[in-house]
Amino acid sequence: MGVTDRKEREKTEMRELIRATAMKMFLEDGYAKTSIRSIAEAIEYSPGTIYLYFKDKDELLYEVQGEAYGQLLEVFKNEATSTDPLEKLRQVGRAYINFGLQNPELYDLMFIIRAPMNVDEEIHKANGGNCFAFLVDCLSDCINKKLLRINDVEQASLLVWATAHGLVSLNLRCRLKIMDQPEEAIPQILIKSMEDYLAAVTI
Amino acid sequence: MGVTDRKEREKTEMRELIRATAMKMFLEDGYAKTSIRSIAEAIEYSPGTIYLYFKDKDELLYEVQGEAYGQLLEVFKNEATSTDPLEKLRQVGRAYINFGLQNPELYDLMFIIRAPMNVDEEIHKANGGNCFAFLVDCLSDCINKKLLRINDVEQASLLVWATAHGLVSLNLRCRLKIMDQPEEAIPQILIKSMEDYLAAVTI
DNA sequence: AAATATAATGAACGGTGTTCATTTTTCATA
DNA sequence: TATGAAAAATGAACACCGTTCATTATATTT
């Protein structure tokens, strides 16, 4: 009975179409400004149809988050390739900040938006886990070789992440305007700050 | 002519009533979940009246932000009193993180929410400027006495702020759930992380 | 007391996420 | 190949939202 197979295929294809369209629109206009109605219009279906494939708007967000985390992990793998643990750590830092600066709306939906993971823990672990694991591995190397001033791996990972996230998110929310720096200098300042930070925690 | 005086007084009193009510409701339910309509209902006026005193919901946010920044500055002044620059810096760090943990909705509206300052620069400078200045002063002391591994004051301030903000905001958005830590241990972990961070950048 | 200026109203507009009775389409069976 | 059941899609309706503005009510001045 090939019909059931096709139906299932069509169902996942439709889900995929919605997900991809949502991803594109979230990326361009942000999560908040993208309405279910506009997604439906984009794929030429009625609003109600979206709800046949996704429980609610948040579930659509989960999905896109998953893909976004995947992209970030790819960036890590491509950019942080050094065999020197410290250099690799610097590469991760740079990659993270550049990712945030180059994909503001995506970054927003991954780390700043209030939504899903406030409730659902497991999905978030699966999504963000791999990215965090990459960082943990990286710092594990550094600590094993006694290159850092912080010896707890989880603590060190948290700190590096928090610092990078702090820099990116304060900038994304324009909170750095209180500093006397021209707009265009910001990216370099963030990168430089991250490097200085890593240098400071390095023995 | 005492009438004009009274009218003016009544006008500022009304503005104040709206602002205070908004503050209370933002603090309890958050900015997004507090509607103009509900604020109006709380003060027993019609929705339209709010707009006679505030341009829009964002202006109400500005106002509350201003007060919130004032509160944070007060906390700094009360908590960071040591004459030892490094100890004072630690006190600022602790105070900031505790403020964020104890006033999540307020913290949200000060540093995470997408809104006003994305556009209006001056208001933000006035609002957050004093708090940032307190940190800058503090770090200035440390650097002058050659106690830090980072020598640029602005850079150091940015880093300390970003780290503290990163810790608080990742927690507020439940992104720390990917770590294997029980909920109730988080506050201590954040404080400890901040202290470890400051220790690492200290000579 | 009448006219004017100020203040408050609340219906209306265009938007949101979401639901669900109804209609359309697809498919297996007779 | 016609028919009835199952699946899919619809779009109007609900309860919200921020905001506007003609209308009404109140207060002040003449």
Image (cartoon, coloured by chain):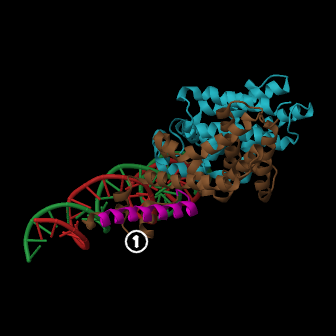
Chain colours: A cyan, B brown, C green, D red
Q: Kindly report the secondary structure that dominates the magenta region of the rendered protein.
A: helix
Residue that label 1 marks: B44
The answer to whether residue A10 shows anywhere in this view is no
Residue found 32% across the figure and 62% down from its top: B8
Most foreground residue, C15 or A155: A155
The image quadrant of residue A154 is top right
> Compared to B80, does A180 lie above or below?
above
For residue A149, side relative to residue B134 (left or right): right
Looking at numbered disc 1 in the image, what kind of residue is underneath it?
Answer: Glu
- Residue B34 location in percent, x, y? 50, 60
> Compared to A22, does A141 lie above or below?
above
Most foreground residue, A32 or B97: B97
For residue A10, side relative to residue A157 (left or right): left
Tell me, yes or no, whether the highlighted magenta stretch contains residue B10.
Answer: yes
Tell me, yes or no, whether the highlighted magenta stretch contains residue A28.
Answer: no
Most foreground residue, D6 or A72: A72
> Compared to B151, does A155 lie above or below?
below
Most foreground residue, B22 or A23: B22
For residue D11, side relative to residue C7 (left or right): right
Chain part drawn in magenta: B5-32
- Residue B81 location in percent, x, y? 71, 52
